[in-house]
Each structure stands twice: as structure tokens, then as C-alpha cells.
Image (spheres, coloured by chain):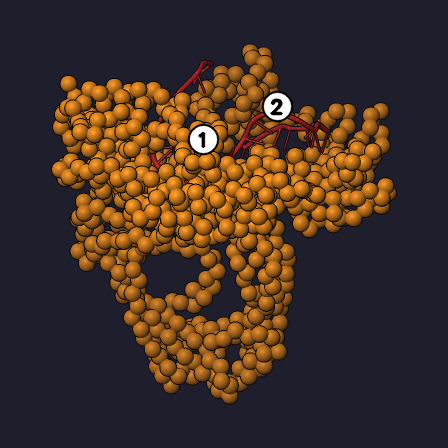
DNA sequence: CAGTGAGCGAGCTTCCGCTTGACTT
């Protein structure tokens, strides 16, 4: 007979807790929410705004199991997390399992240690219905917004689109950032650096690097300065030394872990979460979805011991951190190693690297400040007012820097090159000028978001939760509002003026400007949807919308406001706006734009988001003649495409002529332009203009493809026709039953000599990829 | 990592937060 049943949210947690509690306790997990609004319908009564819950199919078995165990138990302890969602989970459990109030207790604990759990058992409480109602309000509001707005988009923009309190604002951030970048006017300026020398007592010389204390605006100023420096004397005017301290960053939350793993390890946001999940399940780290920076006393103490052991007493400094981010609910601890004495773990290389990052961040947060001394030396130039400044930084005590330094997103830290050790310098000392270099630079516009920096921004705005950052990022990419891509930069030239001896020499160099890799870019659909929502639903799109409704949820949680009253007042304004927008007589779809008239037929040419994405259309649906369509290629935008560019799209497929008795045509496919001949496809090389390709060039490419094709099949096997050795872009590889298997580098040489057995060994040794 | 290549024009689609699961070869 089971005396006690404890229900927590996560199975890993259940396993740990069961160990702390005696045989009288059975611990089970609810696996998050057990009940929710119906998946495929509104499931909210639009008159009373009351939600209608159901137990989803995949939870039925679990609920049955929980029910049976609750019935058997003398007492049920609801131990879900101590936040809105956790309280609601407990309430749903009560309702669904039909728990008797007398034999049910609600408990919460903040860390998974034996004392903390025993302490929680000593202090049970009742369900907090105010907190539950705050969650219901949150849930219903999100459902109303999502399920009312999305159908508007289906009608006005494109089917299967979606809108929501979180995702639509995420897209807005990216669209607006792209517009800022486009509007940004880069201004040139000149930064001037100098190399001086001082002669030491032994006759040797030491270099001193310094920067001019201001940026120059024009090339004339550069010329004037260098001219003035030709015969000038450089004298040390002032030497100041300032002690500086650097404090470690707080331990990881979900958001900061995602950012650092992206910067230091190159992980995507979802990759980080998957690896962290595995570390959590194997008991290596605490829970990975958290907004808390709090560390348990257990960890603070263990860190102290470990840091003292590894680095010495002076490196240890126990600290407590407090969460300041908007909307934080702190149901968990910060993300930290479960055991600080495990500095390394077994596992995949990704697991090892992420664990090491978490260990270092946690350890650093419990270490002493770093102490530096910053030296600033002012160097006057005789005859002019401007000065050079040399700075040096000496680390007096490295403290936490011994293990960890937080990265940041600005890759431009050129000034850092000049911060280093300085030789001893005295006021009044003169310096020997070696060379002075003025380099033209350009002011930097705003940076595009990465997955991780978008998460950072969302957290800052209090939008979304640790459990939704990664899913939100993938949703906006799946809906094709945003794509991760590369932006080609433009080449620009810049000048470098160097004064060496008495001669000023000017050079020009080239660099690529504004190129970006793997950043988030808005698509045409993203832009059109954003502009549409901004026009008709500015309230929902407001960056403060979440913050405002959160205030209401807080009032509900405190019992100062009724949740259905809040819903009603929201819906009163929202619903009519939806109706009005939905039924507004539409002359054209959102984002539609007339480019002009087709020079040939005179029919109007327009662009819009069609059923299959952005299209150019000649003519209208009411014409007697059917309209013509052409997909807009990825590198063109619906916002900026011109009539001429649009008309080009209708020139394909283009017939070039005949070759070996069949037609050669140029078409445009999903993967760019191609040649079609005798039902075979040949890609055009990158950068080739499909409008300029001649029949001769096309035939050459077809022949080239044929020889490649002939050389591709290196070896067949009589034993099994499914097995082949092929030659690919990266050398020889094995194909078996339609799947590819890589050949180790050392086998490339003798690829054609491999036997059937050898190949099958490789095939069978390769693990099956999971979907 | 390993090679891809339509021309559709209606039915269905959708939210945010909690949490992990596992058709068979």
C-alpha cells in the first residue's frame, strides 16, 4: 500500500527526488501540462470567454496511470514548479484526477536537495487559485490572439500563415532591423595610429603604440595632420594609472546559455537545448529551462571547495545573484553542474564542450574579481592641439578570468589591439616617431540579429519564456517569415596614408562591406505580414504589449483583478477589429503592388504574395485571357523589384536551338537556372546569366556533365546491384540502397580496389541516422 | 556535405507554455 504520491513536472526530477524520500513515497511525473485547450479549434467560448479543456490523446495513458496511483495513495503531494504554469498544472491534476481536498497538499521547493524537499513537505499549502487564473488568462489570451489573427492572414495574405503574441513581435524586430540597415548611411572617417620608439638604457629600443585622441572627418584633415607631424616633437605630457576591477558574469540562464554557446561553440539555439537536455537527463546539470541566476547553497559551497583546491583560496569568492530580467518567474535554479567537482565528463564532444562551458561559467561566478591597472599616456604633438594616447592594461590579479571570459556580439574591437603592456614612461620624456598611419574607416550601421541575439532581445523585452525561445526561432523560420542566410556585401575602397621618415605615401585597399553570414533576414512574406499586422493590429504588435498584459496577469495573481473581466475587456476591443479587417472589401491583397504595364500586351503587371510565395502576375483574374505568373527569385524583393526585372522572369524557359535532334532550353528551377536537353538537366554554373547563354556554351556544359556522369560510377558489384562506388564532389563514396556512406580519407586512393566485403563492412558500421 | 528540377489556383492551415516521447530496419 502506497502511503504517499508526489507528482512533479519532469521525470528526471522525479527520479532524483524518489531517492531522497523513503519507501513511503512514490514519485511520478506529469510530463508538463496534462490538459489543454483543444488543439484544432478555438476551444474558448466567445461569449463567456471560458476555456474548454481536454486531455490530449498522447496524455490519456499517463493520466490513467496517475489516477490509479492517486487512488491508492493516502496522500497526494502536488510538487509542480512554483510559477503560474506550475500552479495551473497542479490545478488540472486536481480536477482531472478528482483529488480529495483533504488528502491533497501543494508543495514547492527551490532546489533538489534532501533538506529542501523535507522542508517543503513540512510546509504544505493549498492551491492558489489566483495564480491558476492568471495562467488561464495567459492561455486564453494567447489562443484568442493566435486563432483570430491567423485566419485573417490566410485570407488577406497567404494560407497556412500564423500570427501570435510572441512570434509576430519577433518577426517585427527582424523586419525593422533590416529597414534600419537599409536606411543607414555609412560615413567615412579616419582613425590615426602611431608607432613611437624609446631608447632603453642598454641602447635597445622599445615600441610604443598610440592612437590619435579623435577621429578625423576629411582627407584634408589627414593630410594636414601628417604634414604637421613631419617635423613635430612628441612629448609625454601626462601618465595616469587607474586601478580597475572586472566582475564575473552571473551563472547561466537559458537565454545566456544560448547566447554563449552560439558565440563560443557555434551552436544553434535548438542545438544548445538538445545537448543541454541530454546533460540534464544524465544528471550532469540542473534544469536547462530557467530564467533564474540563483545558485543553491549546495553549489556555492561546493564551488568554494573546488576553486580553492584548483586555484587557491584567494581565487574563491562566494556570491549570490539576483534575477533582474523582465517577467522572470524563477521556478528553478540557474543552469549549473550538479557536481562542481566534476570538471570534465564523458560524452559526445558537443556534450563535453557545453558542459565545460557551464562548469566554467558557474565556477567564474564564484570567483574573485579580476584586478587590473590601466595606464593612460598622453603624447603631445608640438605645434598642434591634437594628442596621441597610448593605453596599457596590466592584469594585477586575474581572478575569475583564469577560467572564463564572457564574449560579446561586437566583433569590432580594433581599439583592443592597442591595449597591452606599456614600457615605463616618464612625463616630459620625448619619443622618437617611427610611423603614423591614417586609415579610412566607415561608421557601422546596426547589426542583423542572430538566433541568439534575437533571444537576447526577446528576453530583454520580456517576451517569451525559456521553454519557448528555441521553438519560436524555428517557427518564424518554418513559416518562412525569416531565413537564416548570407548577405553579400559590396566592395568598397579605402585609403591608408602613412607618414614614414619625411615621406607621406597613400595607398588604396579594397574590402567587402556589409556582408553577413548566418544572420536572420526577413523574407518577402515576413515583410508583408509584418506591415499588414502593424497597420491593422498595432496594439498586439507593440513591443510593450506583453509587458502590459503581464501587469494584468500579476494583478490577477494577487487577487486584485478578475481574470474573465480582463479577458472581456481585451476581447471587446480586439474582436471588432478582427471582424472589420476580415470583412474589409479587399481591392487587392496585402503587399500587392502594381509595377506598370506589360509592353507587349499592355496588361497590368503586379507583384503579390501568391499561393506559393511571392509572384509577378501579368493581367488580372477578371481578364478574358488567363493571367500569367512567374515566381520571384530569392535574391529579388517584392518591395523593390522593377518592371524591367519582373519582365525578365517571363523570358524563361528560353529555347536555344537543337542538339542531337532534341531541343535545348534554359529554365529556372528551385535550385537556380538549368539547361534542359533530352529530359536531362544540367545546372548553369554559379553567376552565369541565363539570358546570355548561347547554344554552343550550353552544348559544352551538357558534354561536360556527360563526362562527369561517366566518371562518377567508379565500381559496380556483381554480388549486389544496390552497392556502388561513386565519385562525388568530395571524392569517392559508397552508395548502398540509395543511401550514401563516406569513405575514410586513407581509402580514397584505392577506392576502385575495395572489395564487396570491405564496402559492406563500412555500410553496416555506419549508424542509422535518426530523423 | 555526396544532388536536386513544379507551374498548381481548393481543402487545410493557426497560438504559447509546460514536458519528453520512439512506427521499424
* Residue sitting at the far right: A600
Numbered mark located on residue A43 in the image: 1
Residue A48 appears left or right of A33: right
Secondary structure type for disc 1: loop
Query: Please, which chain is the residue tagged with disc 1 on?
Result: A
**Colour of chain B in the rendered structure image:** red
Q: Residue at the spot x=49%, y=75% of the render?
A: A214
Q: Residues within 10 Å of mark 1 (few under 14, many from 20)?
A: many
Residue A458: x, y in percent? 44, 49
Q: Which residue is mark 2?
A: A714
Query: Please, which chain is the residue tagged with disc 2 on?
Result: A
The chain shown in orange is which? A
Q: Nearer the viewer, residue B15 or A753?
A: B15
Residue A673: x, y in percent? 71, 37
Secondary structure type for disc 2: strand
Residues at marks 1 and 2 touching, judged by CB atoms closer than 8 Å: no
Numbered mark located on residue A621 in the image: none
Q: Tell me the quarter of the picture where residue A152 sits.
A: top right
Residue A343: x, y in percent? 26, 43
Q: Earlier in the sequence, mark 1 or mark 2?
A: 1
Amino acid at each position: 500500500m502506497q502511503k504517499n504520491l508526489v507528482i512533479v513536472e519532469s521525470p528526471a526530477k522525479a527520479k532524483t527526488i524518489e531517492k531522497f524520500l523513503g519507501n513511503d513515497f512514490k514519485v511520478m511525473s506529469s510530463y508538463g501540462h496534462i490538459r489543454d485547450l483543444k488543439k484544432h479549434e478555438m476551444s474558448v467560448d466567445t461569449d463567456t470567454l471560458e476555456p474548454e479543456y481536454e486531455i490530449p490523446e498522447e496524455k490519456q495513458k499517463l493520466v490513467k496511470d496517475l489516477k490509479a496511483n492517486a487512488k491508492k495513495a493516502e496522500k497526494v503531494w502536488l510538487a509542480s514548479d512554483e510559477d503560474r504554469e506550475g500552479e495551473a498544472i497542479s490545478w488540472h491534476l486536481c480536477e482531472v484526477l478528482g483529488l480529495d481536498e483533504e488528502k491533497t497538499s501543494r508543495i514547492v521547493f527551490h532546489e533538489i536537495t534532501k533538506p529542501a524537499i523535507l522542508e517543503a513537505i513540512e510546509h504544505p499549502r493549498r492551491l492558489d487559485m489566483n495564480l491558476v487564473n492568471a495562467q488561464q488568462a495567459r492561455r486564453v489570451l494567447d489562443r484568442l490572439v493566435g486563432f483570430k489573427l491567423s485566419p485573417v492572414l490566410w485570407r488577406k495574405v497567404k494560407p497556412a500563415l500564423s500570427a501570435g503574441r510572441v512570434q509576430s513581435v519577433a518577426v517585427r524586430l527582424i523586419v525593422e532591423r533590416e529597414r534600419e540597415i537599409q536606411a543607414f548611411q555609412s560615413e567615412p572617417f579616419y582613425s590615426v595610429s602611431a608607432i613611437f620608439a624609446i631608447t632603453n638604457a642598454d641602447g635597445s629600443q622599445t615600441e610604443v603604440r598610440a592612437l590619435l585622441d579623435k577621429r578625423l572627418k576629411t582627407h584634408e584633415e589627414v593630410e594636414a595632420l601628417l604634414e604637421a607631424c613631419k617635423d613635430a616633437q612628441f612629448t609625454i605630457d601626462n601618465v595616469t594609472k587607474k586601478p580597475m576591477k572586472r566582475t564575473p558574469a552571473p551563472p547561466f540562464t537559458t537565454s545566456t546559455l544560448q547566447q554563449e554557446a552560439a558565440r563560443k561553440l557555434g551552436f544553434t539555439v535548438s542545438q544548445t537545448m538538445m545537448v543541454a537536455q541530454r546533460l540534464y537527463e544524465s544528471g550532469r546539470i540542473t534544469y536547462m529551462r530557467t530564467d533564474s541566476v540563483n545558485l543553491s547553497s549546495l553549489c556555492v559551497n561546493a564551488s568554494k571547495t573546488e576553486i580553492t583546491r584548483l586555484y587557491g583560496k584567494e581565487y574563491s569568492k562566494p556570491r549570490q545573484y539576483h534575477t533582474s530580467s523582465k517577467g522572470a518567474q524563477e521556478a528553478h535554479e540557474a543552469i549549473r553542474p550538479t557536481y562542481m567537482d566534476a570538471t570534465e565528463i564523458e560524452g559526445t564532444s558537443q556534450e563535453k564542450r557545453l558542459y565545460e562551458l557551464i562548469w566554467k561559467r558557474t565556477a567564474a561566478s564564484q570567483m574573485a574579481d579580476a584586478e587590473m591597472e590601466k595606464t593612460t599616456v598622453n603624447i603631445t604633438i608640438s605645434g598642434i592641439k591634437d594628442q596621441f594616447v597610448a593605453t596599457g592594461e596590466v592584469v594585477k590579479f586575474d581572478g575569475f578570468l583564469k577560467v572564463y571570459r564572457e564574449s560579446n556580439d561586437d566583433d569590432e574591437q580594433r581599439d583592443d589591439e592597442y591595449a597591452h603592456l606599456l614600457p615605463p614612461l616618464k612625463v616630459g620624456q620625448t619619443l622618437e616617431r617611427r610611423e603614423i598611419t591614417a586609415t579610412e574607416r566607415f561608421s557601422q550601421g546596426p547589426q542583423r540579429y542572430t538566433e541568439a541575439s534575437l533571444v537576447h532581445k526577446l528576453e530583454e523585452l520580456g517576451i517569451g519564456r525559456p521553454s519557448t525561445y528555441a521553438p519560436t526561432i524555428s517557427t518564424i523560420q518554418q513559416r518562412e517569415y525569416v531565413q537564416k542566410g548570407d548577405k553579400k556585401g559590396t566592395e568598397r575602397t579605402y585609403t591608408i596614408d602613412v607618414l614614414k621618415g619625411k615621406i607621406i605615401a597613400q595607398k588604396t585597399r579594397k574590402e567587402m562591406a556589409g556582408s553577413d553570414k548566418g544572420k536572420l533576414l526577413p523574407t518577402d512574406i515576413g515583410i508583408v505580414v509584418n506591415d499588414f499586422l502593424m497597420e491593422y493590429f498595432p496594439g498586439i504588435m507593440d513591443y510593450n504589449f506583453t509587458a502590459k498584459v503581464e501587469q494584468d496577469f500579476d494583478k490577477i495573481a494577487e487577487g486584485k483583478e478578475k481574470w474573465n473581466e480582463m479577458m472581456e475587456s481585451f476581447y471587446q476591443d480586439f474582436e471588432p477589429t478582427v471582424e472589420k479587417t476580415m470583412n474589409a472589401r479587399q481591392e487587392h491583397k496585402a503587399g500587392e503592388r502594381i509595377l506598370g504595364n506589360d509592353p507587349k500586351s499592355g496588361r497590368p503587371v503586379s507583384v503579390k504574395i501568391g499561393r506559393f510565395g511571392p509572384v509577378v502576375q501579368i493581367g488580372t483574374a477578371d481578364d478574358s485571357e488567363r493571367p500569367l505568373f512567374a515566381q520571384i527569385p530569392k535574391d529579388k524583393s517584392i518591395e523593390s523589384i522593377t518592371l524591367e526585372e519582373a519582365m525578365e522572369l517571363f523570358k524563361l524557359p528560353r529555347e536555344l536551338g537543337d542538339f542531337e535532334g532534341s531541343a535545348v532550353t534554359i529554365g529556372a528551377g528551385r535550385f537556380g537556372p538549368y539547361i534542359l536537353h533530352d529530359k536531362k538537366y544540367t545546372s548553369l554554373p554559379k553567376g552565369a546569366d541565363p539570358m546570355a547563354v548561347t547554344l554552343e556554351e550550353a552544348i559544352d556544359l551538357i558534354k561536360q556533365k556527360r563526362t562527369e556522369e561517366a566518371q562518377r560510377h567508379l565500381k559496380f558489384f556483381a554480388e549486389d546491384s544496390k552497392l556502388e562506388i561513386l565519385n562525388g564532389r568530395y571524392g569517392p563514396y559508397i552508395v548502398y540502397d540509395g543511401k550514401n556512406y563516406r569513405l575514410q580519407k586513407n581509402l580514397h586512393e584505392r577506392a576502385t580496389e575495395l572489395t564487396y566485403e570491405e564496402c559492406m563492412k563500412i555500410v553496416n558500421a555506419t549508424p542509422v541516422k535518426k530523423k
